[in-house]
Image (cartoon, grey):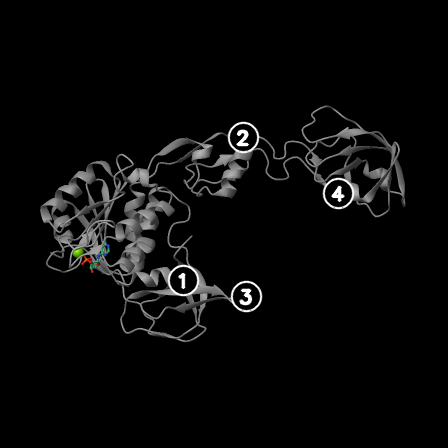
């Protein structure tokens, strides 16, 4: 059955996924600014005007002419009025004059300096300013933040709070973002029942469906996209029935950009997916030299990409973070694709005997020395969900590493954003 590449390294698998996903770049769509959160910007957004558009005060105080403060102080300037933020009336000050001003108010013509109110004493219609003020201080020149034509947010950026605020500051109420991939999630296994249902003697509850839906949600792919009418569960569950899995895959391939399955992809008697997908689609690879998660399969059925993730809950999560999420990002043209790795020091030694990349559940924390340390949790079985809850990161132990000493620097993949 092995006419397709098998036992790829993690890097080879990531490269293959990136290539296939880039061939399926999703189109750009226009959305209202308030709906743009967590989406990927499809094209550069340029400033149509300077920000700030006019010279204005950075503080509450008094706008003055810097030359009036040139001589040793104190200085006594005539207060000719007040200008609050939002006041667009023209104001001008002449030598020996000043204007009360608030943060964000346009600087009056003639003024080039703001003296903060804490440094001033108001004496009837005069303001007394002591020595030591610097000409030009507390003034925000036009275009200080960005200039007309500057890229305010670049294509490929995921829109979070900072990007959303920056986009709003340009005045646009719509942005062009990548369409979201239409994702279908299917879990497989005769032994699985839904939480809330009666659990038979040899059965366990389906947890991967929920874990996968939640991970998709953290990628900005909402549950409403996963279910047809918003009431159905976010995923479909299938028994280990070759024909039913076949027709579910073919059906999903008609409408989805991406299918994610869990279970049934190893070498067991009921593991139908590799043979089935080779029949109805094209397998890009089966098995990656990683642990957990080795049996992962990546394929296409028509235009639809398919990730078959192994069923053990830790394998499902590790393969999603390491391989599926970068694929979803590439389809959306995200500038930063791939697992977001950090560096940490190892708090306890590690040893492994195999030549695969190991993803070890660990607790990472910044210690008093200011450094991030990672401690592998005691039990690493790929079926142990509890470890996923205890851990907040996966230590990535490279293929070639056999032993790693305490305080070696390792890469870690955070489990939450
Ligand atoms: P499989 O990959 O189908 O051989 O499954 C490997 C292990 O993962 C078995 O112990 C399954 O019971 C378990 N498993 C498979 N799918 C799920 C799921 N959706 N939720 C929880 N455990 C699962
Ligand atoms: Mg199974």
Q: In which quarter of the image is ligand 1?
A: bottom left
Residue occupying the point 22% across, 40% down: 303
**Residue 137, label in figure:** 4
Report the Cα–Cα distance between label 3 and label 2.
41 Å
SS at mark 2?
loop
The answer to which of marks 2 and 1 sits earlier in the sequence is 2
- Dots 3 and 2: beta carbons under 8 Å? no
Report the Cα–Cα distance between label 3 and label 1.
17 Å
Does 373 appear above or below 16?
A: below
Residue occupying the point 61% across, 33% down: 50
Mark 2: give few (<14), some (14-19) or many (20+) Cα within 10 Å.
Answer: few
Locate residue 390, reporting x and y percent: 38, 63
Q: Mark 2 points at which residue?
A: 171
The answer to which of marks 3 and 1 sits earlier in the sequence is 3
- Dots 4 and 1: beta carbons under 8 Å? no
**Residue 370, label in figure:** 3
Q: Which of 369 and 304 is in front in this view?
A: 369
Does 100 appear above or below 130?
A: above
Q: Mark 1 points at which residue?
A: 412
- Dots 2 and 1: beta carbons under 8 Å? no
Locate residue 371, reporting x and y percent: 51, 66
Mark 4: give few (<14), some (14-19) or many (20+) Cα within 10 Å.
Answer: some
* Residue 141 placement, left or right of 275: right
């Amino acid at each position: 059955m092995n006419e397709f590449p098998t036992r790829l390294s993690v890097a080879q698998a990531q490269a293959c996924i990136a290539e296939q996903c880039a061939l399926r770049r999703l189109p750009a769509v226009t959305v209202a600014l308030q709906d743009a959160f967590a989406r990927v910007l499809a094209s550069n957004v340029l400033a149509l005007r300077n920000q700030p558009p006019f010279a204005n005060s950075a503080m509450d105080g008094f706008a003055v002419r810097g030359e009036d403060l040139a001589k040793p102080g104190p200085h006594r300037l005539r207060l000719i009025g007040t200008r609050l933020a939002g006041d667009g009336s023209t104001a001008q000050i002449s030598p020996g004059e000043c204007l009360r001003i608030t943060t964000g108010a346009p600087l009056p013509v003639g003024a080039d300096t703001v003296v903060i109110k804490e440094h001033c004493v108001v004496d009837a219609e005069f303001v007394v300013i002591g020595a030591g003020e610097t000409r030009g201080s507390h003034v925000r020149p036009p275009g200080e933040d960005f200039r007309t034509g500057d890229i305010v947010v670049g294509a490929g950026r995921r829109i979070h709070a900072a990007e959303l605020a920056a986009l709003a500051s340009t005045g646009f109420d719509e942005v062009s973002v990548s369409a979201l991939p239409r994702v279908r999630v299917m879990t497989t296994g005769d032994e699985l029942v839904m939480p809330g249902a009666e659990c038979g003697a040899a059965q366990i509850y389906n947890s991967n469906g929920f874990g996968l839906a939640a991970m998709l949600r953290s990628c900005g792919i909402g549950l409403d996209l996963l279910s047809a009418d918003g009431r159905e569960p976010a995923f479909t569950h299938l028994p280990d029935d070759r024909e039913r899995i076949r027709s579910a895959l073919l059906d999903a391939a008609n409408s989805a950009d991406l299918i994610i399955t869990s279970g049934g992809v190893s070498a067991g008697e009921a593991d139908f997916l590799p043979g089935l997908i080779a029949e109805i689609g094209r397998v890009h690879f089966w098995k990656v030299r990683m642990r957990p998660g080795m049996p992962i399969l990546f394929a296409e059925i028509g235009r639809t990409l398919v990730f078959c993730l192994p069923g053990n809950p830790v394998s499902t999560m590790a393969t999603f973070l390491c391989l599926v999420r970068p694929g979803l990002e590439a389809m959306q043209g995200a500038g930063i694709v791939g697992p977001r790795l950090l560096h940490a020091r190892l708090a306890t030694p590690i040893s492994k005997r195999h030549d695969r990349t190991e993803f070890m559940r660990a607790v990472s924390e910044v210690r008093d020395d200011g450094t991030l340390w990672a401690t592998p949790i005691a039990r690493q079985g790929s079926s142990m969900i509890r470890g996923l809850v205890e851990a907040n990161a996966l230590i990535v132990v490279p293929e070639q590493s056999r032993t790693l000493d305490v305080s070696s620097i390792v890469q870690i993949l955070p489990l939450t954003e």
